[in-house]
Image (cartoon, coloured by chain):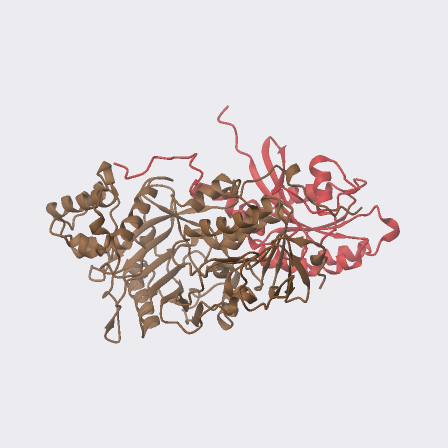
Chain colours: A red, B brown
Amino acid sequence: MSAPERPTVIKALLIGPSSSGKTSLLKRYVDDVFEPDDTTTTIGVDFREKKFTINKKLYRLLLHDTAGQERFRTLTSSYYRGAHGILLVYDISNRDSFLSMPRWFEEAEKSAPEGVIKILVGNKTDRTAQRAVKASEGEELAKKYGAIHFTETSAKTRDHAKEPFQKLVDTVLSTPGALDLNRTVASRADAVDVSGRGQAQGGGCAC
Amino acid sequence: MNIEALDQTVWDAVIAGTGLRESLLAAALARAGKKVLHLDRNPYYGDEYAALSLDELEAWAKNVPSNHMRSVQYKTYPAPEGSGLKKSRSYTLSLSPGLLYAASPILSLLVKSSLHESLEFLKVGGWFVYDVAAPLSDPLKRVPNSREDIFNDKTLDPRTKRVVVRALKSMVGLEGGRSGTSATSDGMPLQQYLEQPTFRLPSSIIAAFTSLTLRHDLPNEIPFGEAEQRLKKHFDSLGRFGAGFSAVIGRYGSGSELVQVLCRAAAVSGNAIYVLENGIVDIQEADPIPPSTPTVSTESTEQDIRLSLKSGDIIRARHVVGIPSNLPTGASTIQTSSESTGYWMSIYVVSSPLKQAFQTDEPPPAAGAIIYIPAGSIEFDGYPNTNPIYVVVHGSDTGECPDGQSILYVSMKYTGSNEVEILDAAVKSLLQKVAYEESAADSTPAHILLSVAFKACTGLESPAQISSGKVHLLPHHVPMIEIPDSLVEQTMEIYEKIVGSRDGFLEKVAPQESESQEENRG
């Protein structure tokens, strides 16, 4: 065998209004846990990572969460850089949450790389009694804004909770050119290693 | 809009403006467990370090949100079919290009705190002096970095080569030579130093050394002591990250990307809240002290300050930080009269990749280059440029413009008249000569697609850093070609006043320790 293969990186983002359960979905997918009382925004973690192998090829899925910057819609444009896919998450028990989604689609359109894969997720299906958004409405919105997939989930009950992530990965891998979107990661070779762990030749001239 | 609960917390610090220092402070404070509310009156991050799309830049030009950037001229130029400006979003144009030397303390701070992993740095490969008199094919003269460079230079005679090496040795201790210049030479201008009988260097070499200072003054105006520091920085940085280059730029813009990564780091810590298009309109100490007078630090620091925000919220804070023009107390301290000193900065998008400027012998490929145009090289209406011009070239590898185009950040000291025209003439001259071969090949001459010129005034000196107990004024600064090292010190000073110590500045705390969230509602 040759040198160990470097995993292919897939960068995915979660966006959407506060309290739509983005972090819960993420935790359910990555750790298979649900913390009912944890209403605070994601803390201390820049991104979560999931490694997997498909057809003997190694992949690293990096999942970036909003770190609370969705609260006042102040996500940085650099958050979107190099993203392959975006999960847009709203809360089906909160009408306003759903109504804010066009603005999130527009922001993704403005800031994310062209051709980024978008998936619309209506979360919290466990709240049957409080449902304020019909599934058909989500379906329609997804179509209108070019999301390739729509699903309703519950991070709490696991209902379809892995589906949006799996769909995202499948689509990135099956769409020709979708992986190349991530110019940032693809071109790492051109970048200078500033950590000093690299070539460090000492100061002065090279003679 | 849903302003949730900004008034439910006593903020340890409210920071107005997302410039680089403010963002560095926000990240450091948030990582130290302090509650930070970080505001910017603009709809984008970065303040004077912002990087904007075409549409955003056009809007910026119409209504510049800064006292320090004035007389903006935004111009687009007609272009032949297919070679014009592309979509607004394919451009990321920085208000200050901001290179970083390898030896910069900012870089080591980023590495220490692992924030460099969220950024990509690209090589500033070429460092050139523009020789307007040179033949068409060869107008860029590479600034020598080593003895080999000097000995390979065919335009120098053997005596000059030896002297240049000696001058380099004496100035920067190159190749083990002692950098033992005497104190008496410190005040001497760089030009005089290099023209001393022991050296008597030709003007081309003096221009090359001057270009390394990144100073916009004439060689006979730069005190040797200062030039020496600048040259040392360059030579100290050479080779640290790879052979033959000393500086890097960030992909998609240095300062603006740094700002965004720092602000995200602050948010990720769980202790910082970000609100754009909002600012502080009034500051009231607990004992009502007239807000327009900077207060003296006599009162007890236990008391909170009350802040009125543009959004109408009234919040409480222990500390307030910002540059004078972002704070109501600071505005009165700015002297608005003096516009006499400063720089013209003009951002050009041109229809050429300017390959010659990025030529490099060693990997990685270069994405940035510096071209120095000595005084007297360019002419407009019979008048030459009386001051040198710096051209910082960003290629499309930076992700800041489409392939086949490049961005030129052109700056010159302000002296009086026709400056924008002189900068235009400089760019046209460069395009004619540097893009000569490219133009010849595809028969469309390289041309300017967009220019955005503005005056960056340094004459509006606000008082130096003031900390009146709880209100911390950062001095205004006009970032030019380089992101200044001094901002680390300025930021740490305020950090120390708020936290009590500089220990652990920007260090990441383990996630479980950083958890200081009180309001865990079920």
Total numbered badges shown on the rendered structure: 0
* Residue B168, percent from left and from top: 22, 45
Q: Quadrant of residue A132?
A: bottom right
B64 or A17: nearer the eye?
A: B64
Horizontal placement of A52 versus B96: left or right? right
Q: Quadrant of residue A105?
A: bottom right
Asked if B334 appears above or below A75 in the picture, the reply is: below
Asked if B240 appears above or below B490 in the picture, the reply is: above
A115 or B162: nearer the eye?
A: B162
A135 or A184: nearer the eye?
A: A184
* Residue B95, percent from left and from top: 45, 61
Horizontal placement of B416 versus B396: left or right? left
Q: Quadrant of the N terminus of chain B?
A: bottom right
* Residue B45, percent from left and from top: 55, 58
Residue A81: in sight, yes or no? no
Asked if B287 appears above or below A47 in the picture, the reply is: below
* Residue B67, percent from left and from top: 47, 69
Residue B362: in sight, yes or no? yes
